[in-house]
Image (cartoon, rainbow, N blue to C red):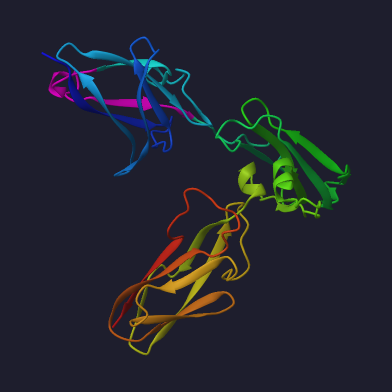
């Protein structure tokens, strides 16, 4: 019987059994020499799944698979299913497989942000890539001390700047004072932003959160991360209104002022049912006609482009009676 094409699925999880999206799964022949196909894990009903088509047979056909994603280790430390490369067997029909299907569970060990050992410090760490997606080696980052704070536990915080450089994995880390204010210069940003006449490019302002660790990338390039509503849903009468408190938090864990109108857009999906009136720290829902709709918060400031960008930061269900 000739080999038959079969659907093969790879389910990727981390050491906490959480799905790992964005993992590249490449398939080679059994010797690992000839490339066959590849796919990237995406969200499928809450699982991280990569799906390919491979030939199978009653006597299974073997393939070598390799997994990769920056910040995720596939070194076998979590068991045989966490090795890269590893062999798999594809059956046709799939019912002949030991599990009754050509599905494979693979584990990767995700990067855990290292914590500062000093209670006054926050450890900022993260990975950087170049424009082709490879680890960016030797990227220079300068953290300039703004002397806020200037004194901690009776010690003067001196020194003009801290110099960082990414390693062979594109990784860098630094300990900074919690609540401290710094300026950061990132080598490639200055190069890319400077015009041919050498216009002055201002550094990025950094405010360190009061926690043990943070992603260095989020600290350097913060965007709106979450929008919280209190209450979490609204019911008003026609011509009635209700005030909703809004808390906007950046990915650098900084709470933005008020409703952050420069960074967030608030829209009612059906403006014939209700409208929103914006205040300094709250939004007010005004009912117009009976029905249901929702208030949606989305990013307004797209100066920093992130992938993926969430379609909505927060949704507030609204019922008008």
> Would residue 92 be counted in the magenta stretch?
yes
Tell how many labels.
Answer: 0
Looking at the picture, how far across and down is residue 168, in whole percent?
65, 25
**Picture quadrant of residue 120:** top right
Image height of 4 relative to 30, above or below:
below
Camera-side residue of 287 and 151: 287
Residue at position x 28%, y 13% in the image: 62
Q: Could one spot residue 233 in this view of the protein?
A: yes
Residue 65: name its quadrant.
top left
Residue in the image at 50% along x and 62% along y: 227
Query: Range of the magenta residues?
Result: 90-109
Residue drawn at x 71%, y 35% is 139
- The residue at 40%/18% (across/down) is 79
Is residue 117 visible in the rendered structure shown here? no
Q: Quadrant of the N terminus?
A: top left
- Is 207 left, or right, of 12 in this rendering? right
């Amino acid at each position: 019987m000739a080999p038959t094409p079969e659907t093969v699925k790879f389910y990727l999880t981390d050491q906490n059994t959480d799905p790992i999206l964005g993992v590249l799964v490449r398939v080679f022949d059994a010797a690992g020499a000839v490339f066959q196909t590849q796919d990237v894990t995406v969200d499928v009903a809450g699982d991280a799944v990569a799906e390919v088509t491979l030939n199978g047979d009653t006597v299974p056909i073997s393939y070598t698979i390799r997994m990769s994603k920056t910040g995720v280790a596939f070194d076998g430390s979590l068991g045989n299913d966490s090795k890269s490369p590893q062999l798999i067997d594809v059956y046709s029909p799939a019912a002949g497989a030991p599990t009754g299907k050509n599905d494979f569970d693979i584990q990767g060990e995700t990067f855990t942000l290292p914590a500062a050992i000093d209670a006054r410090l926050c450890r900022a760490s993260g990975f950087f890539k170049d424009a082709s997606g490879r680890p960016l080696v030797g990227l220079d980052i300068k953290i300039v001390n703004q002397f806020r704070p200037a004194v901690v536990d009776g010690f003067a915080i001196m020194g003009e700047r801290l110099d960082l450089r990414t390693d062979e994995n594109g990784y860098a880390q630094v300990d900074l004072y919690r609540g401290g204010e710094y300026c950061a210069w990132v080598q490639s940003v200055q190069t890319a932003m400077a015009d041919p006449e050498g216009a002055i490019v201002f550094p990025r302002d950094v405010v360190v959160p009061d926690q043990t660790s943070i992603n260095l990338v989020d600290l350097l390039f913060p965007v709106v991360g979450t929008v919280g509503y209190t209450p979490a849903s609204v019911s008003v009468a026609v011509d009635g209104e209700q005030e909703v408190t809004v808390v906007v938090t950046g990915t650098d864990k900084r709470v933005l002022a008020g409703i952050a109108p420069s960074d967030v857009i608030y829209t009612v999906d059906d403006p014939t049912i209700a409208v929103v009136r914006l205040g300094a720290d709250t939004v007010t829902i005004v009912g117009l006609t009976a029905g249901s709709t929702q208030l949606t918060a989305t990013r307004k400031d797209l100066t920093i482009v992130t992938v993926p960008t969430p379609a909505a930061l927060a949704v507030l269900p609204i019922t008008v009676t």
